Image (tube, helix red, strand yellow):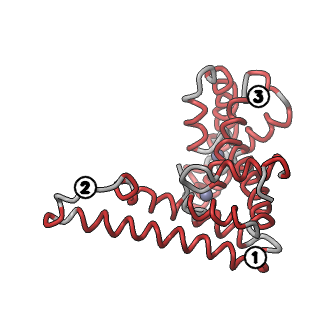
């Protein structure tokens, strides 16, 4: 399979996600997360299922809350969801303030209990969307890695980040093709090491006159991406 016409839409999407540098699963997950946040309009946050998930999670996680905050036109949706979250905090701490059940009077155990009760009871719905997307594409990658052009694309984009590599290796059926996956990963890591080595060498005053290539110049940032995923 070399022509796009013979590929399913998701296979094309996966290949396109490997066109630039960086973990394709990070890119695909990030896109799905942004699309979901974009859809968190006024109407969407009033939808019962979404509202319940947002209430259990006490809004979105820190990263996605800030994405939502910075989204043009997101203010009203944010106000509605976080109003509920703050009201929940007031309601859930009310009993602790009663003279009979006041945790302040009863000390550390009750304070610790309250701390646990204030924990969200559900995951950030946007994180869940991202994880689900990454998982689906990880399964697809395991099927497609047998294609030489996918191995080349994966190597040239720098491979998967470590969290997504581990996720992919943990999928059922990874055993059979893990060698192909690892080959592409190791080739990508070796290339990165070469660039980081040059970055370090050329930072030495004796070699300062040697110009860094573009790849060498940001290799130290891509080393972080490789370990923790793309932000
Ligand atoms: Zn990743
Ligand atoms: Zn999140």
| SS under mark 3 | helix
Q: Residue 45 carries which label?
A: 3
Res 176 quadrant in image: bottom right
Please tell me in which quarter of the rendered image ligand 1 is found. Answer: bottom right
Q: Residue at 79% of width from left, 60% of height from top?
A: 140
Name the outermost residue toward the front: 3
Q: Which mark is residue 125?
A: none
Report crowding for label 2: few under 14, some 14 to 19, many 20 or more residues within 10 A (C-alpha): few
- Of residue 1 and residue 114, the one placed in the foreground of this image is 1
Q: Does the residue labelled 1 lie within 8 Å of ligand 1?
A: no
- Give the distance between the C-alpha atoms of the residues marked 3 and 2, in whole angstroms: 52 Å
Q: Which mark is residue 211?
A: 2
Q: Residue at 24% of width from left, 63% of height from top?
A: 202
Q: Name the residue under label 1.
A: 177
- Of residue 188 and residue 86, the one placed in the foreground of this image is 188
| SS under mark 1 | helix
Percent position (x, y) of residue 101? Answer: 67, 47
Please report contact status of discs 2 and 1: CB closer than 8 Å, yes or no. no
Report crowding for label 3: few under 14, some 14 to 19, many 20 or more residues within 10 A (C-alpha): many
Percent position (x, y) of residue 85? Answer: 67, 35
| SS under mark 2 | loop
């Amino acid at each position: 399979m070399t022509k796009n016409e013979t590929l399913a839409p998701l296979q094309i999407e996966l290949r396109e996600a490997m066109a630039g540098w960086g973990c394709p699963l990070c890119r695909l997950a990030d896109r799905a997360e942004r699309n979901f946040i974009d859809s968190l309009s006024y109407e969407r946050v009033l939808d019962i299922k979404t509202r319940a998930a947002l209430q259990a999670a006490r809004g979105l996680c820190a990263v996605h809350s800030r994405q939502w905050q910075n989204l043009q036109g997101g203010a009203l949706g944010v106000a509605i969801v976080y109003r509920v979250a703050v009201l929940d905090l007031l309601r859930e701490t009310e009993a602790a303030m009663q003279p009979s059940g006041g945790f302040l009077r009863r000390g550390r155990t009750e304070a610790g209990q309250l701390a646990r009760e204030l924990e969200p009871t559900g995951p950030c719905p946007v994180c869940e969307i991202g994880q689900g997307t990454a998982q689906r594409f990880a399964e697809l990658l395991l099927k497609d890695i047998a294609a030489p052009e996918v191995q080349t694309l994966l190597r040239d984009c720098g491979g998967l980040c470590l969290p997504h590599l581990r996720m992919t290796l943990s999928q059922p059926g990874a055993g059979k093709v893990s060698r192909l996956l690892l080959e592409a990963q190791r080739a990508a890591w070796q290339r990165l090491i070469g660039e980081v080595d040059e970055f370090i060498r050329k930072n030495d005053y004796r070699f300062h006159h040697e110009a860094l290539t573009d790849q060498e110049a940001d290799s130290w940032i891509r080393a972080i991406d490789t370990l923790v995923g793309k932000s």
